[in-house]
Amino acid sequence: MFHQVTIIGLGLIGSSLARAAKSYGLSSRVVAYDVDPSVRARVAELGIADAVANELENAVTDADLTIICVPVGATSDVARQMKDHLKPGAIVSDVGSVKGMVCDALSQILRPDVHIVPAHPVAGTEYSGPDSGFATLFQDRWCIITPPDGTSPDAIEKVRAFWCGCGANVESMSAHHHDLVLAITSHVPHLIAYNIVGTAADLEEVTQSEVIKFSAGGFRDFTRIAASDPTMWRDIFLNNKDAVLEMLGRFNEDLAALQRMIRWGDGQGLYDLFTRTRAIRRSIIAQGQETSAPDFGRVRKED
Ligand code: NAP
């Protein structure tokens, strides 16, 4: 599909992409670069790329497709560093969880003879680093692409085909719409999880050991999300501020309504809401985005 795909940032997503590109034959050559020398050494040891570059500039020179897989806040720096070294007609993509800021930054920084096709695979785990990746991470997951207006259809098609080759389903939308959708489906849920785990950690009337001991009551499912990478999530909230604040406003209103139902003993109201939410989980399972297995449906690392 490509002669050379270059991956910048070999964490969970970047290393999974390198593995997928090699396993599914999506590129003749996969080149990797990470700012962290110990990550570069580990990637070479794992053999998940054909070459590991010590400089970003060298990594991108011959790339037909470069995919930026760093925390969203580092995207502009990476783009500035690679700008003069990309070949004319090269495609630059990314995997950032926020798209408005990334699209603006890439469009402003990169040269006009380079094609920009931002992407966001809606797939992941709470683990980080090159050892945490696996080739099948994107299988049957959605990848959202947000090409700016006027992007070459050929470049869009190539990026779409690459993600399909990784086993993903691809949908295209505007960066603005992506950020609203992800604010409610991913960013606000993470904020709620960080908050509830933080609140439990600060409680005085209930000890930490009680929180841990009795966590199967629901708390532990939040701790999985709240264990996600702090740098990545800090960058997401700083760069998707408007959409997150808008969705948080709606969430707070609904929470106040729930509070009222509890205060006034509105059992019917509570029952109706919980029945509606149960149906949403069933739809997610029916559409293959989760399994019906208990324990949050995920296979444990050691299994
Ligand atoms: P990760 O496991 O923390 O990996 C990021 C890697 O990028 C780290 O090795 C990091 O090195 C490196 N890096 C940071 N700044 C760099 C730079 N300027 N140049 C080159 N490498 C640099 O993160 P991840 O989970 O793969 O996330 C990467 C991106 O994917 C983020 O934008 C995130 O929003 C997006 N995403 C994540 C998920 C998920 O579930 N994790 C899902 C979808 C999309 P250091 O550790 O030394 O900083």
Image (spheres, rainbow, N blue to C red):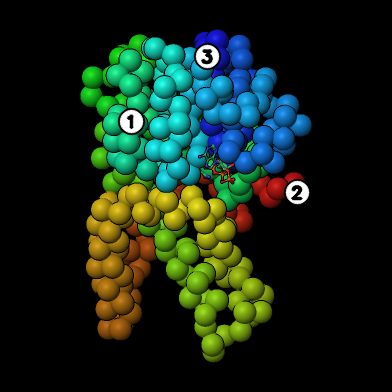
Residue count near mark 1 (Cα–Cα under 10 Å), binned few <14, some 14–19, many ≥20: some
Instruction: Name which residue type carries label 2.
Output: Glu
Instruction: Name which residue type carries label 3.
Output: Asp
Q: Is residue 144 above or below residue 125?
A: above
Q: Is residue 235 above or below residue 62?
A: below
Name the residue located 35 percent from the left edge and 68 percent from the top edge: 271
Q: Is mark 3 within 8 Å of ligand 1?
A: no
Whether residue 162 is visible, yes or no, is: no
**Residue at mark 2:** 302
- Tell me which label, 1 or 3, sits earlier in the chain: 3
Q: What percent of the width, then of the height, locates residue 137?
A: 58, 35
SS under mark 3: loop
Name the residue located 30 percent from the left edge and 40 percent from the top edge: 100
Q: Is residue 78 left or right of residue 208?
A: left
Q: Are marks 2 and 3 in contact (CB under 8 Å)?
A: no
**Residue at mark 1:** 109
SS under mark 2: loop
Q: Is mark 2 within 8 Å of ligand 1?
A: no
Q: Nearer the viewer, residue 252 or 48?
A: 48
Instruction: Name which residue type carries label 1.
Output: Ile
- Tell me which label, 1 or 2, sits earlier in the chain: 1
**Residue at mark 3:** 62
